[in-house]
Amino acid sequence: MPETHTKPTASEATEPDYAGLVKFLVEPFLELPESLKVDCEVSPSRGKVWVRVAFEGADKGRVFGRGGRNIQAIRSVLEAAARLAGYSAYLDVFGSSAQGNDGDHDREEIGDKPPPRRASGVKEPPKLRSRTAPPEVQ
């Protein structure tokens, strides 16, 4: 007997699996993919999607990437998928702190990073100063 396929409704066709998408994008960066937890909250009345991910703190550097490039790319893909469905998307990343700072979880967002610190004992490079004025060209 041939299979009959029903045409998906508009909401089924445009509602992406946000949690599955983020899980698909984040898992390759994790050393322990089973530690990944993804929570998704969709508010149709507000037109917003909140996705929260949590994983081991040791993987945070790989997930965020140099200068936050990886996490920004993940956010861009999530935002594009949500925009197609008529939503705006927000991604929060939680991870257990590698240094054991203050608490079990550390909330990270792009732009919230402190400036890089120099190692102790490392001095600033000397500033170059011109001792004499450059000769005038005639």
Image: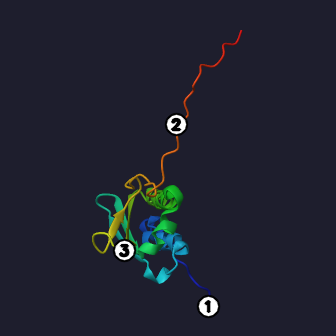
Say if 77 sits above or below 20 in the image: above
**Which residue is more in the foreground, 90 or 70?**
70
- Furthest residue in direction right, as rendered: 138
In space, the residues marked 3 and 2 are separated at their CA atoms by 40 Å
In space, the residues marked 2 and 1 are separated at their CA atoms by 81 Å
- Check contact, mark 2 vs mark 1: CB within 8 A: no
In terms of image quadrants, where is residue 17? bottom left
In space, the residues marked 3 and 1 are separated at their CA atoms by 53 Å
Residue 12: x %, y % from top left: 45, 70
Q: Which residue is mark 1?
A: 1
Q: Quadrant of the C terminus?
A: top right
Of the two numbered discs 2 and 1 on the same chain, state the one appearing first in sequence: 1
**Amino acid type at mark 1:** Met
**Amino acid type at mark 3:** Ser
Of the two numbered discs 3 and 1 on the same chain, state the one appearing first in sequence: 1
Residue found 52% across the figure and 62% down from its top: 65
**Which residue is more in the foreground, 50 or 70?**
70
**Which residue is more in the foreground, 3 or 65?**
65
Q: Is residue 138 visible?
A: yes
> Element type at marker 3?
loop
- Furthest residue in direction top, as rendered: 138
> Element type at marker 1?
loop
Residue 33: x %, y % from top left: 49, 80
Residue found 55% across the figure and 74% down from its top: 28
Mark 3 surroundings within 10 Å by alpha-carbon count, few (fewer than 14), some (14 through 19), many (20 or more): some
Q: Which residue is mark 2?
A: 127
Mark 1 surroundings within 10 Å by alpha-carbon count, few (fewer than 14), some (14 through 19), many (20 or more): few
Of the two numbered discs 3 and 2 on the same chain, state the one appearing first in sequence: 3
Q: Which residue is mark 3?
A: 96
Residue 101: x %, y % from top left: 31, 69
Q: Quadrant of the N terminus?
A: bottom right
